[in-house]
């Protein structure tokens, strides 16, 4: 019975228990039941996400409890990611609109952005940057927010994703962001960047087919990337040198396709980023190295659909 649930902390504990008992999958912004229950509870109560723990003992009204429990029920029965239930996701310390038009923002690239892309940028000057496969716009807009002197292009093939990105551009007053529709680099002829950051689809066909129900709410276009997860990444490696300045850098997320990429291109010197929790399938590539190994990269990429 839920009659005994009286405080905020009661609701959070109850939600976490129900989520674990239901076998939910956690991977959209949060990796555990307690954080998800906390986010949904505070959202339903119209309280800030960083409210002090002392408020956990605050009593809730019956109407408030019903609102919270209603969100818990939808999370369990419909397997909707928390960000889609609340319409909000946090990325690089910023609040973004989030809905099924694009993947829920969750890339570890957020940590790179907050750290100023150091030590990778070093003494390189960035005037123009590109977020390729921008989705909700989170990477490009966060780059622009923390580096107001940069001019940032954010490109995606999906009209729906670009519409969501436009709402986030307005939400965060990112006037130094330009949104562009492009199938990878196809609509970017003649554009050159000091930094290209991309989080393309990289989930294998087999893995996509086996994903938990939560992922069914996300656009498959943002996930599926062929038998080894590298259909798009190889094309990006092939074409990036045409759009990088002489000392330009490419930063690309390939997730668990990291091993497949290392097997295909063992001679390509890629620097794999170490995050606070270890490697997470994100590499840094120098334009010079991409040019040096272009013939081999092109041969592999040209075979992809």
Image (cartoon, helix red, strand yellow):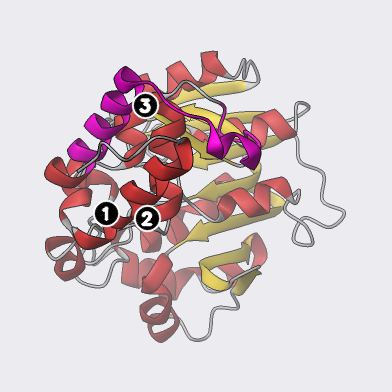
Task: Name the side, left or right, on which 36 lies relative to 95.
Answer: left
How far apart marks 1 and 2 lie (CA) works out to 6 Å
Q: Which residue is mark 2?
A: 33
Please tell me which residue is depicted at 39% across the width and 66% down the height of the picture. 298
What span is colored magenta in the figure? 48-75
Q: Which residue is mark 1?
A: 19
Please tell me which residue is depicted at 20% across the width and 68% down the height of the picture. 207
Q: Nearer the viewer, residue 246 or 50?
A: 50
Q: Mark 3 Cα within 10 Å, few/some/many (few <14, many 20+)?
A: some
From what the image shows, is residue 246 above or below residue 86?
A: below
Q: Position of residue 185 (x, y in %)?
A: 42, 41
Q: Position of residue 124 (x, y in %)?
A: 82, 51
Mark with earlier residue (3, 2): 2
Q: Which residue is mark 3?
A: 87
Q: Position of residue 134 (x, y in %)?
A: 44, 37
Residue 26 lies in the magenta-colored region: no
How far apart marks 3 and 1 lie (CA) works out to 20 Å
For residue 259, which quarter of the picture? bottom left
């Amino acid at each position: 019975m839920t009659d005994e649930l009286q405080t905020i902390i009661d609701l959070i504990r109850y939600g976490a228990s129900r989520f674990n008992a239901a076998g939910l999958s956690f991977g959209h912004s949060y990796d555990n039941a307690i954080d998800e229950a906390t986010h949904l509870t505070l959202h339903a109560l119209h309280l800030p996400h960083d409210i002090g723990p002392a408020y956990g003992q605050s009593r809730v009204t019956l109407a408030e409890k019903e609102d919270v429990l209603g969100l818990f029920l939808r999370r369990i029965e419909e397997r909707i990611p928390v960000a889609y239930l609340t319409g909000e996701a946090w990325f690089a310390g910023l609040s973004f609109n989030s809905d099924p038009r694009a993947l829920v923002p969750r890339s570890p690239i957020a940590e790179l952005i907050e750290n100023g892309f150091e030590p990778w940028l070093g003494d390189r000057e960035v005037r123009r940057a590109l977020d390729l496969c921008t989705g909700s716009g989170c990477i490009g807009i966060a780059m622009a927010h923390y580096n107001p002197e940069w001019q940032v292009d954010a490109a995606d093939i999906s009209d729906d994703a670009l519409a969501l990105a436009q709402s986030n551009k307005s939400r965060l007053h990112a006037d130094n962001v330009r949104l562009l529709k492009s199938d990878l680099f196809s609509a970017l002829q003649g554009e050159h960047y000091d930094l290209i950051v991309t989080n393309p689809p990289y989930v294998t066909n087999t893995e996509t087919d086996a994903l938990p129900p939560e992922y069914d709410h996300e656009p498959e276009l943002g996930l599926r990337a062929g038998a080894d997860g590298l259909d798009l990444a190889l094309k990006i490696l092939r074409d990036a040198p045409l759009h990088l300045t002489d000392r330009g850098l490419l930063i690309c997320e390939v997730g668990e396709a990291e091993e497949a990429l290392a097997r295909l291109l063992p001679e390509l010197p890629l620097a794999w980023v170490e995050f606070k929790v270890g490697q997470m399938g994100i590499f840094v590539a120098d334009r010079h190295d991409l040019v040096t190994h272009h013939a081999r990269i092109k041969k592999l990429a040209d075979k992809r659909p």
